Amino acid sequence: MGAMYKRLVIYYLSGTGNALKAARWFEKQAQTRGMKTELIPIDRFKTPIAPPPPGVTLFGFLYPTHGFCLPWYMLKFMLLFPRGQNHLFCLNTFAGSILGKLPLPGLSGIALLLPAIVLAVKGYSVSGLLSLNLPSNWISVHPGFTKHAASLLAEHCEKKTEKYASILLSGKRVYNGLISLPLDLAVSPIAVIYQFIGRFWLAKLFMANSDCNNCGICAHNCPTNALVMKNDRPFWTYRCENCMRCMNICPEKAIQTSYAFAVISNYVIYGLLLPFVVTVAMRYSETAASVISSKSYFISLIRAWIIICIMFLGYRLILRLTRFRPFDFIFARFTPTNLRFWNRYLAPGVSLKDFNIKNNSTSRKK
């Protein structure tokens, strides 16, 4: 039997409510044991971060999985978190799905390993590494779950959480999140690519069509403060973490993922611009041309960043053009996410009011 805890403090980042649900389930289990609890959303956090509270306190860090990694926003929070010697656990929610009544698992990649290393280096004792296969909210690539399917997965995960909490809160250790470690390590290169390239590229696929009424709900409720209103429509900055909150809370369902921009921009850059640059370079220096077209990791990374910068410029141009009906149709309406059957998703029992916080100091103490 390990140390008994008197207090539970959970820091969470939640796009559409999955991590928030998990935090509340843990809170419920802690309260039945007479523990004091505090749930702290890290939305729009600012440094300095308060030092760990004294006493026999168990910490939890709860967050979604993006690209087989934890969101950079949560990782940055952990890197800036003060040193301490408390016990803690990390829990990631990943893209779960369901077949009939059978819940299907997902993969964590380095979403647990990386924070475990960071926090251990800071002096903490990592007592738990856990995963929950809550419904995928990535509606950029698939329709949102039906309420029935989402409820079935949520019930399944709540039971798992009760089991995990029972072990952790009694002072023991649990590392169920490492069950798929070999597969997680196999997909870890994707996590690196996502962190350095993918998340910036995906952030430039969001567009609001002419149904947008400039209400600003998406910008006011973005957890990373990544949206600004320009020309009466939202504009996604490089801070976007692709948490999908904006798409799922828009009352007009005006926010879409622009497949047309993805296809056209990639064709222009890779099919036209890059071959043109290589051809011109060949006229002056074969060495320069070979460097530009090199497949080495370092050159590929530099080339990818240059391409992303070009894509950013194209994104700004297209957003201005969507004020005109033909461009609005092509880039912000001609997309699967605009179809009527393409459901939006919020975790069962979670609504917009659960995200309405003023700053990172807002918390719930009991």
Image: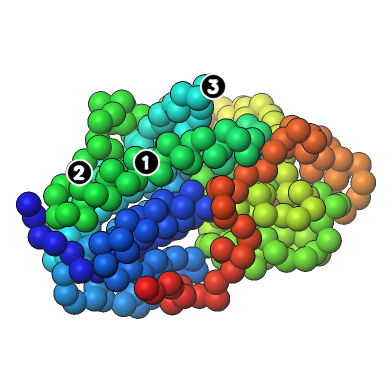
Of the two numbered discs 1 and 3 on the same chain, state the one appearing first in sequence. 3
Of the two numbered discs 1 and 2 on the same chain, state the one appearing first in sequence. 1
Against 274, residue 168 (above or below) is: below
Q: Nearer the viewer, residue 296 or 217?
A: 217
Q: Amino acid at mark 3?
A: Gly
Marks 1,2: beta carbons within 8 A: no
Give the image location of residue 363, x and y in percent. Answer: 43, 73
Q: Residues within 10 Å of mark 1 (few under 14, many from 20)?
A: few
Q: Amino acid at mark 2?
A: Val
Q: Please give the name of the residue rendered at 40% of the width and 68% of the height, measured from the top-left corner.
A: 40
Against 143, residue 28 (above or below) is: below
Figure quadrant of the C terminus: bottom left
Please identify the quarter of the rendering in which residue 51 is found: bottom left
Q: Which residue is mark 2?
A: 174
Report whether 219 appears left or right of 215: left
Q: Please give the name of the residue rendered at 70% of the width and 64% of the height, measured from the top-left corner.
A: 217
Q: Which residue is mark 1?
A: 159
Q: Amino acid at mark 1?
A: Lys
Secondary element type, mark 2: loop
Please identify the quarter of the rendering in which residue 214 is found: bottom right
Mark 3 vs mark 2: in front = 3
Q: Residues within 10 Å of mark 3 (few under 14, many from 20)?
A: few
